[in-house]
Amino acid sequence: MSFEDHAIAPVKEEQIAQWLGGRSFEDVYRDYSETGYAIFERVLSDEQLTEIRSALRPHLEADIRGRGDFEGLKSNRVYAMMAKSDVFSHLAAHPLPLAFSEADLGTSCQLSAMLAINLHPGETPQPWHHDDSHCKLPRPREALQVSAFWAIDAMTEDNGATEFLPCSHKWTEDRIEGTASAESYTDRSEKTQDVGARDDAVKAVMPAGSLMLLNGLVWHRGGANRSDNPRLIITPQYCVGWMRPLENFLLATPKHVVQRMPKRARELIGYSIHPPFMGYVNGMHPSRALERAEDEAA
């Protein structure tokens, strides 16, 4: 089997130069690799933010709260976003987070998960975790994931800005004080003490429209919302092409939605090949299988 005619086109530096502050991608990526994070302010325009908020509004108004301490008892989480609006497929395929994901994970990287997180006032700190911990592979190692955090609302000192531990992708510890456990996903008890409080934690304070990227091994958590207003982010998470994504986008996203997605977004949710042929459909590239489905429907 040969799939060379369906090769994925990597992000080019000129596509992201406007956000690099006059530096080369190699230079910015070197800092990211050393510290485990990068922050880019005001990447999204006010018009883009308005469009995103509008697409999310009906799902947030349903006010479905988290099932446990990890999701947040005073938080809304919106899943299956690629099926909910075209604006989210464009956000998932944004060249800036993709450039770092491709550099870390290869051009065959996939979208592992994509969700919106809305922290209401009174939300408590999330347990510490790193986003590729589900792989159950011991540290130290190379990261298998890159996480993007789009600030749809400004993230401030008081409203639950994501907290992270710089350079922690180099740590060997599989657990730290306040780490998420199996019980974190179902525990509905009120928290009166922050057992994970740390002096070395940094809050990702940034204006609306900004982007933070974290290496998949960096320890982080959602902060406590001590303000009077909600705090909304969207977090696409990218993984190596050979690893099973957290979210099953192929089932969550109807084919008629997939057909109108940008090509790169389709590739990210599984309509692509990890070399040499992982992901084929009946011996064919999955994009050809999608084209055949279109022809049959017509």
Image: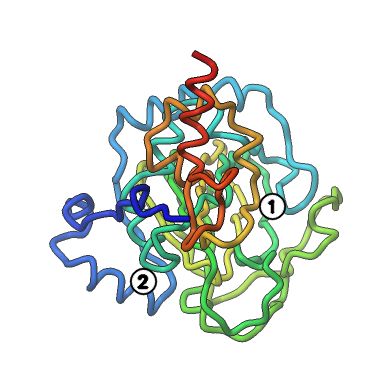
Number of residues whose C-alpha sits closer than 10 Å to that of mark 2, classed few (under 14), some (14–19) or many (20 or more): some
Residue 2, percent from left and from top: 42, 55
Number of residues whose C-alpha sits closer than 10 Å to that of mark 1, classed few (under 14), some (14–19) or many (20 or more): many
Judge left or right: residue 88 versus residue 69: left
State the SS at label 1: loop
Check the image and report above or below for 157 versus 103. Answer: above
**Callout in the foreground (2, 1):** 2
Q: Which residue is mark 1?
A: 124
Check the image and report above or below for 283 versus 28. Answer: above
Q: Residue at x 54, y 68 (%)?
A: 144
Residue 158, percent from left and from top: 52, 51
The kind of residue tagged 2 is Tyr
Residue 6, percent from left and from top: 37, 48
Q: Which residue is mark 2?
A: 32
Of residues 175 and 4, which is closer to you in this image? 4
In the image, farthest residue toward the top: 298
Residue 73, picture quadrant: top right
